[in-house]
């Protein structure tokens, strides 16, 4: 794939993701993430593993992390 094609694909994916208003997060993943964050021994790697199981939860976390909130 050429550099131009990669950029075009990346832009298309970005535009598609921007159109998504909200995805419902899995209750099981949200519960696991809440339990993990309550555990002082939880590592960022473990939280990453939990959130990676649910694209909607990942999108919510990224949206919050990139906001001015």
Image (cartoon, grey):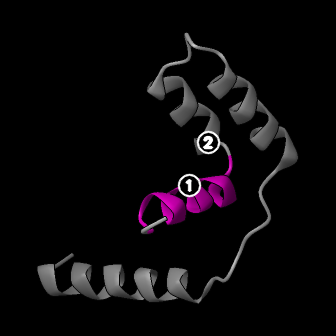
Q: Which labelled disc corresponds to residue 51?
A: 2
Q: Distance between the residues labelled 1 and 2?
A: 9 Å
Side of 32 relative to 60 (left or right): right
Side of 35 relative to 18 (left or right): right
- The local secondary structure at tag 2 comes to helix
Do residues under tags 1 and 2 come within 8 Å of each other at their CB atoms? yes
Identify the image quadrant of residue 8: bottom left
Q: Closer to the N terminus: mark 1 or mark 2?
A: 2
Furthest residue toward front: 69
Q: Viewer-nearest of labels 1 and 2?
A: 1
Relative height, residue 56 to residue 36 (above, below): below
Identify the image quadrant of residue 35: top right
Identify the image quadrant of residue 30: top right
- The local secondary structure at tag 1 comes to helix
Secondary structure mostly seen in magenta is: helix
Residue under pointer 1: 61
Q: Which residue is drawn at 65% across and 15% down?
A: 39
Residue 46 pos. (x, y %): 54, 24
Is residue 64 magenta-colored? yes
- Give the magenta-colored segment's residue range: 54-67
Residue 41 pos. (x, y %): 55, 10
Of residues 23 and 2, the one nearer the viewer is 23
Relative height, residue 64 to residue 10 (above, below): above
Q: Residues within 10 Å of mark 2 (few under 14, many from 20)?
A: many
């Amino acid at each position: 794939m050429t550099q131009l094609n990669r950029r075009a694909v990346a832009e298309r994916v970005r535009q598609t993701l921007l159109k998504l208003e909200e995805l419902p997060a899995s209750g099981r993943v949200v519960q696991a993430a809440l339990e993990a964050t309550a555990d002082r021994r939880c590592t960022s790697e473990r939280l990453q593993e939990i959130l990676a199981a649910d694209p909607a939860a990942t999108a919510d976390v990224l949206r919050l992390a990139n906001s001015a909130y």
